[in-house]
Image (spheres, rainbow, N blue to C red):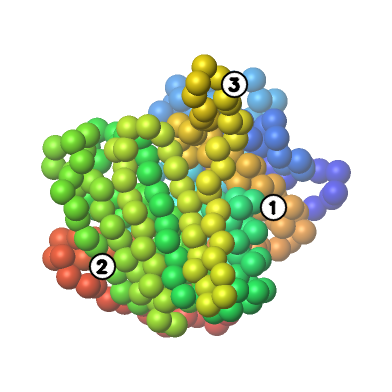
Amino acid sequence: MSTDTPLGIAVIGTGRMGADHIRRIDTVTNGARVAAVADIDADRAAHAAHGIGGCTPYTDPAAAMADPAVDAVLIASPGPAHEAALTAAFERGLPVLCEKPLTPDAASALRVMEAEARLGHRLVQVGFMRRYDSGYLQLKQLLDSGAHGRTLMLHHKHRNAATPPGFTDAMLINDSVVHEIDVTRWLLGEEITAVHVLRPTPAGGAPEGLSDPQLVLFETAAGQICDTELFQNCGFGYQVACEAVGEHGTARTGDDHGLVVNAGGRWGGAITPGYVERFADAYDRQVQRWVDATRRGEVEGPSCWDGYAAAAACEAGVRAQATGARATVELAGRPGLYG
């Protein structure tokens, strides 16, 4: 691709995440443009494309990918639609940034991974955006340096103000803890081998039928223990943090409070309301890195293996929720394409 020609991107799915990516590519990302959008809701697709020069709306993802102006695909549709969209992208040889989950379950994620492996080269980067957050990047660099010796434990915190109607216990794992699953694997360079879920007495603000908060424990292949405090109806905002405990020191990220004000005999600051605001810089960095790599003819970042391994660990987590017992993570063999 010419260095003067922007990467034409088809954005599949124009809901909250897709709309935010459309805005990002159109106004923030260098070297790219939104060439097409697709959504089963024709009016929403048209609204998303409105005001973006050269952007064509579609209701069929495959048709959007077939647009001659499209060089790459960003998938932000609901998880159950990802496998079909990824298959269509593979058929056209299009690089993909796929929002998590790769697919909603391990079996379909395995099919996608095996299909990509048959191509003999990577096309997919999975959108685990915490890997692009500045604080997590610094923590990763510190742990990789060995300055604190071997990492023994990770303590994760994942709080949200409220869950939407219909949110289930399984969604607590598949939609929330999946991020801690991926970042644990990435920070430690180890696979998660087992999951255990403990349930305190639900908080008063928890919706009926939802067990919230929960404490989710991971075991890794190297014997590390990692815990996640998951509190998705805390009522006061969105907080994500991670503390690593090493043999010779600890390090923590995620405690940023921004501006702290002292006035009227009180002090305090703001708590971000949601994930889009908390990880805005990470999303920007992730998309820019993907665009830059794609323009170089390369694929980097979380792979289909990472998406599959996260799905398998999520399935173990849901089993652990249902039984109250430790559940082992079952993984297929790792294709050579993924190292």
Pinpoint residue 295: horizontal percent, then vertical percent.
75, 54
Of circles 1 and 3, the one toward us is 1
What residue is shown with label 2? 196
Q: Amino acid at mark 3?
A: His
Tally of numbered tags = 3
Asked if residue 249 is positioned above or below residue 253 in the image, the reply reads: below
Of circles 2 and 3, the one toward us is 2
Furthest residue in direction top, as rendered: 264
Q: Secondary structure at mark 2?
A: strand
Distance in Å between CA atoms under marks 1 and 2:
35 Å
> In this orientation, which residue lies closer to the viewer: 290 or 191?
191
Q: Secondary structure at mark 1?
A: helix
Q: Amino acid at mark 2?
A: His
Proximity of marks 1 and 3: CB atoms separated by less than 8 Å: no
Q: Amino acid at mark 1?
A: Arg
What residue is shown with label 1? 289
Pinpoint residue 209: horizontal percent, then vertical percent.
13, 42
Asked if residue 190 is positioned above or below residue 109 in the image, the reply reads: below
Q: Is residue 88 left or right of residue 289?
A: left
